[in-house]
Image (cartoon, rainbow, N blue to C red):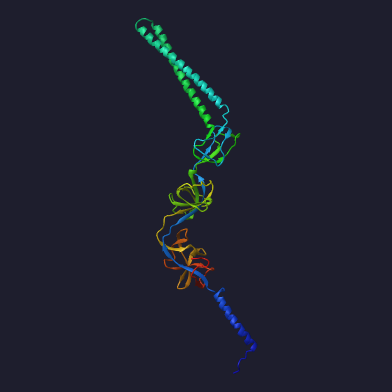
């Protein structure tokens, strides 16, 4: 049998290439595309989930007082500006009364005349009454004629009518005076509450129509948060739920509050539910109206059940599930999700059970054929 001879040069090349090929295969299996994927795993545990709702809202005033005249006129003066603190009953400004002061004085003079007329009518009535009584006695004693008695009775009736007219006149005069005084007082712009000026709609010299606001005042004690929550996650939203409020201007300070009211009408455009969240205690530093706030609501805790970390959830097509490790093999298992909390725990209603091992981190995307290497800790995360 003839032996196959290999040239020395070819043999030398094989000796050099063989280790390189082995090294290439080793590197490919250890750190190349065929290398196992590093993963971190965790066990499905049973625990109670305390769901939370998170929403963004704005600071609003529950009560806004728009102060202006009830009669058209020209603004004579305005003594306050935006941001100033005012007290209940404080005079903020005044409309030009035009001739109202003169009309009030004229009505006061008319009232004095009506009083004088009333006193004169009372005196005439008293005299007529005395005369009528006297002639009644004289007629009874046959000392005067019936004609004279009839005349005195007619005089008494005339005096009664004059007295009634005088009383009606003074009542009318009082009513007209009170109406003018009320109209004059309505030109005085007075704050109804202790509050803060938030808007100044006119300046002195401006003509203001009836019902138009000149200034706006809010009560700082009536501030609340108008919060929007996603309709999908708003199950269980109800009045009285405790809330944690983080105002943008308070450097991360969390204030306590509660849901005061859930609006019966939702926003059909943004698909959000609106709620009013009140402060349990008013902030020492009053936030400006319109400031953004982050609101977290504590929902009632649910019974203990299987939960998985939110980081373990993966999507394959239209299914949401987890990578499930069974006897070292990797399987994608669709799961049915329940409630979740803000700590990253998601309730599992079906698919995996307590004690199952799942992947919570992988250095790259996994497939059912992926080889895996379990890590003790997630890279870059300190324990």
Q: Is residue 304 above or below residue 128?
A: below
The percent position of residue 229, horizontal first and vertical second, equals: 49, 52
**Extreme residue in the top direction:** 143
Tell me if 261 is positioned left or right of 12 in this view. Answer: left
The percent position of residue 28, horizontal first and vertical second, equals: 57, 76
Name the residue nearer the viewer: 117 or 305: 117
In which quadrant is the N terminus drawn?
bottom right
Q: Is residue 225 visible?
A: yes
**Extreme residue in the left direction:** 141
Tell me if 141 is positioned left or right of 70 in this view. Answer: left
Q: Is residue 70 visible?
A: no
Q: Is residue 33 above or below residue 302?
A: below
Tell me if 326 is positioned left or right of 100 in this view. Answer: left
Total labels: the figure holds 0
Name the residue nearer the viewer: 362 or 5: 362
Tell me if 122 is positioned left or right of 94 in this view. Answer: left
**Extreme residue in the bottom direction:** 1
The percent position of residue 64, horizontal first and vertical second, equals: 51, 41
The percent position of residue 257, horizontal first and vertical second, equals: 46, 50
Residue at 47% x, 63% y is 309
**Extreme residue in the front direction:** 284
């Amino acid at each position: 049998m003839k032996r196959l001879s290999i040239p020395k040069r070819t043999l030398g090349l094989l000796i050099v290439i063989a280790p390189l090929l082995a090294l290439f295969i080793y590197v490919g299996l250890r750190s190349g595309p065929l290398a196992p994927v590093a993963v971190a795993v965790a066990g499905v545990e049973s625990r109670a989930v305390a769901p939370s709702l998170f929403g963004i809202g704005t600071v609003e005033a529950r009560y806004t007082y728009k102060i202006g005249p009830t009669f058209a006129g020209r603004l004579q003066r305005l003594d306050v500006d935006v941001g100033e603190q005012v007290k209940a009953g404080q005079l903020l400004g005044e409309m030009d009364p035009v001739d109202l002061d003169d009309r009030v004085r004229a009505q006061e003079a008319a009232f004095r005349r009506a009083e004088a007329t009333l006193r004169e009518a009372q005196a005439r009535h008293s005299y007529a009454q005395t005369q009528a009584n006297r002639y009644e006695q004289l007629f009874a004693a046959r000392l005067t004629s019936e004609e004279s008695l009839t005349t005195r009775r007619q005089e008494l009736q005339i005096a009664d009518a004059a007295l009634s007219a005088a009383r009606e006149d003074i009542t009318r005069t009082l009513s007209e005076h009170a109406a003018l005084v009320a109209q004059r007082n309505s030109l005085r712009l007075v704050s109804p509450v202790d509050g803060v000026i938030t808007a100044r709609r006119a300046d002195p010299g401006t003509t203001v129509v009836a019902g138009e606001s000149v200034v706006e005042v809010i009560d700082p004690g009536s501030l609340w948060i108008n919060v929007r929550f996603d309709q999908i996650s708003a199950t269980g939203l109800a009045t009285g739920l405790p809330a944690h409020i983080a105002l943008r201007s308070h450097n991360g300070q969390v204030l306590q509050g509660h849901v005061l009211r859930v609006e019966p009408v939702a926003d059909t455009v943004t698909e959000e539910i609106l709620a009013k969240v009140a402060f349990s205690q008013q902030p020492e530093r009053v936030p400006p109206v319109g400031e953004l706030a982050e609101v977290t609501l504590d929902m009632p805790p649910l019974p203990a059940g299987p939960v998985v970390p939110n980081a373990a959830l993966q999507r394959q097509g239209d299914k949401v599930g987890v990578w499930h490790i069974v006897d070292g093999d990797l399987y994608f298992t669709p799961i049915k999700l329940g409630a979740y909390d803000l700590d990253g725990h998601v309730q599992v209603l079906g698919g995996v059970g307590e004690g199952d091992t799942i992947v919570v981190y992988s250095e790259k995307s996994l497939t059912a054929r992926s080889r895996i290497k379990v890590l003790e800790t997630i890279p870059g995360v300190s324990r």
